[in-house]
Image (cartoon, helix red, strand yellow):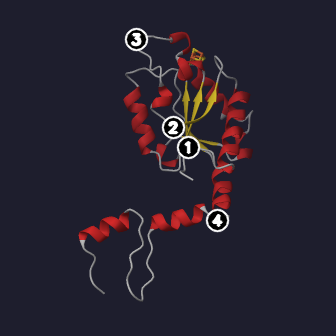
Amino acid sequence: MDELNDNEIVESQEGFVEEIPGVITTTSMAINDFLKKTVAQDVINWGRKNSLWFLTQPMGCCGVEMIATGCAHYDTDRFGIIPRNSPRAADVMIISGYVTRKYLPALKTLWEQMAAPKWVICMGDCSISGGPFYESYSTVQNIDKMFPIDVFIPGCPPRPEALLQGFLELQKKIMAKKDNATDY
Ligand code: SF4
């Protein structure tokens, strides 16, 4: 079998199947595209929506509500929603409260450290529109331009029940293939 030249390798990385006589070849992208068109994607999504592990990086007062949601009283484990302390092990980032311009680079780093597929929940008026810090010099006002947010939860602060409802809405979006994590 001839060795692939550089151009063929580039094409392979972009998802094209190589034409080699007598040999069936494929790529991970081709497998991924195939799965999206089958019922297998529904099974995968069922697993994903029942294991939404969220990163515990509280910001502002909404962060306290986020922590309370993860405690025993609300028992989020029954939905597969479990708090995680490492971005490597988390699927969901909750932007809980105001994001200052100084903190934004750290938030982006945490997001980039999370493995795909991953989702974002925007919690509280501060993160959605600035809230009490609207047009403040130090607070980020357009967080939806920086992160692919799936669910917005208004309130100041939203109660844990509202965050739980937000998670359930995210689960519905994942099963309906309308979430931002996967390009269906
Ligand atoms: S939305 Fe309200 S509760 Fe949440 S961080 Fe802003 S001021 Fe605090």
Tell me the distance, in whole angstroms, between the alpha carbons under discs 2 and 4. 25 Å
Q: Residue 99 at what x, y percent from top left?
A: 47, 22
At x 59% / y 19%, what residue is drawn? 125
As drawn, the label of residue 134 is: none
**CB under 8 Å between discs 2 and 3:** no
Q: Among all residues in the image, which is located at the extreme bottom?
A: 22
Tell me the distance, in whole angstroms, between the alpha carbons under discs 2 and 3. 24 Å
Which amino acid does the dot numbered 4 rest on?
Answer: Thr
Classed neighbour count for the residue bearing mark 2: other residues with Cα under 10 Å, few (<14), some (14–19), many (≥20):
some
At x 50% / y 29%, what residue is drawn? 144
Classed neighbour count for the residue bearing mark 3: other residues with Cα under 10 Å, few (<14), some (14–19), many (≥20):
few
Viewer-proximal residue among 35 and 8: 8
Tell me the distance, in whole angstroms, between the alpha carbons under discs 4 and 3. 49 Å
Mark 2 or mark 4, which has the lower sequence index? 4
Mark 1 or mark 4, which has the lower sequence index? 4
Q: Nearer the viewer, mark 2 or mark 4?
A: 4
Q: Among all residues in the image, which is located at the extreme left?
A: 6
Secondary element at tag 4 = loop
Which residue carries the number 1 mark? 180
Which amino acid does the dot numbered 1 rest on?
Answer: Asn
**CB under 8 Å between discs 2 and 1:** yes
Which residue carries the number 4 mark? 38
As drawn, the label of residue 148 is: 2
Ligand 1 shown in quarter: top right
Asked if the residue at label 4 sits under 8 Å from ligand 1, the reply is no
